[in-house]
Amino acid sequence: MKKVICFVLASAGALLVLTAQQRPIQIEVSKDGGMPVIAIPDFRGSGDAQKFMAAFNETLYADVNSSGLFKIVSKSFLPLFVPQQPSDFQQPPPPPADNPRGRSTQITQPTNGGGHWMQDWANPPAQARYMASGYTAVQNGVFVLQGWLYDLSKGNPTNGQLIGNRYLGSVDEAGARKVAHEFAADIVGLFGGKSLFGTHIFFSSNRTGHKEIWMMDPDGKNQRQITRFNSISTYPNVSPDGSKIAFTSWRPGQPAIFIFSVDPVRDLRYYNQTASVNQAGSFTPDGKQIVYASSAGNGVCCRIFIANLDGTGFRPISSSSAIEVEPKVNPKTGTDIVFTSGRSGPQQIYRMNMDGADVERLTAGTGEASNPSWNPDGQHIAFAWTQGYATGAFNIFTMSVANRDYVQLTHGDGKNENPSWAPDGAHIVFAKTRGRSSQIWSMLANGTQLQQLTTVGDNERPVWGK
């Protein structure tokens, strides 16, 4: 087994951030290098806002937890009283200096207990370093969140306030989730993370009776249909800015590449070469061209091509007589491509320059490897690999392209394939097949925090875009 690599999230202690008042502050991690410990109690809403608080609290907790940056205190360990705003904190009186017999007592940190003072959240059983607090209300037809984050070690709410912002949304569950996403994004950003709020996952689903292209939010919410071809549409890929998707559909009667704008959904018209295979690949970093696999030209299935976004100017990049598919352009440099090829026997992951030169195999040649996906850093890939296991028993791996060190993220439990990196470079979405059902899952890039995102129909080939 090769040396295992790990993906390290940005150190919270290395970043300067700004409070709502634009004061520079230093976020510190614990001396033992552990994760920051944060308390996230359930928020309450006044009036009509309360009916949406279950969705709000679920979203806030899930976003912070899935960032992989924090250790969140179990809610069973939190004090009963939750301050909703800074004025709700009540500093306890200091202990008496002398006892009735005139002897000095041991001075301890005063506490009211029950959550009224910051030390109640920092002391056992919660033992938090940070605390999120706030409340919601409906004001003038708008769902309003007032959210705070405190550093409990600073002694009082004034000194400890790191965030104190107002967030606005529509008066419905979608609005409650929106403001929760935004507050969580501010918390995650304060500690050097990148929020996934506003990004989307595109995938293929047969839930309508036909395989169509769908999209959803990173937490699996707001799933919506993009194509309505009543045919087979699959292999989605998204442009670097998230404004376009490319995919393959059999709607014309033979496989053809389509490029759609996302908002609004609109067919941008793409010229396809006549071929038995036209498989959408990926966009170049500037968003002006796509690479794809096609059997066009000499009938070889398949070569790697590059073309403009309207299909013009196409030309082959690879020239092997073997089947070569799934080309992905390095999103950081735009100078090299990873792809799947059978030129050495069973399918493996290869890398080559954009002009087709300097072809090299990345995987060891054992088992079968496919579905390469670049990390946004342009230095690592994720892919599916049997790695010597039974044919078809794929698991998700990541690899450093420079030194070929790899780590296995999934271990059995069905077939795991088609990984795609999130824009933060710290999460991966993939398809898991158990029995006859294929569903979309996400996880951190260390294989933890697995979350099932789809449940209806068969769902496959996810790709994560902005």
Image (cartoon, helix red, strand yellow):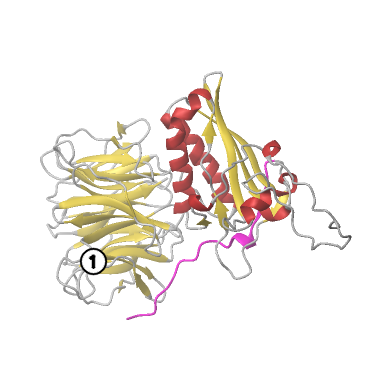
- Above or below, comparing residue 413 to residue 219 in the picture: below
Residue 54 drawn at (x, y percent): 43, 36
Q: Is residue 407 left or right of residue 192?
A: left
For the record, the magenta segment spans 1-20
As shown in the figure, which amino acid type bears the numbered disc 1? Gly
Residue 17 in view: no
Front-most of residues 247 and 59:
59
Front-most of residues 182 and 317:
182
Front-most of residues 134 and 435:
134
Q: Which quadrant of the figure contains the N terminus?
A: bottom left
Q: Is residue 27 left or right of residue 395?
A: right
Residue at x 16% of width, y 55% of height? 295
Q: Is residue 195 left or right of residue 410?
A: right
Kindly give the residue lying farthest to the right in the view shown: 102
Corner quadrant of residue 15: bottom right
Residue that mark 1 sits on? 412
Residue 190 in view: yes
Disc 1 element: loop
Q: Is residue 433 left or right of residue 310?
A: left
Residue 232 drawn at (x, y percent): 15, 42
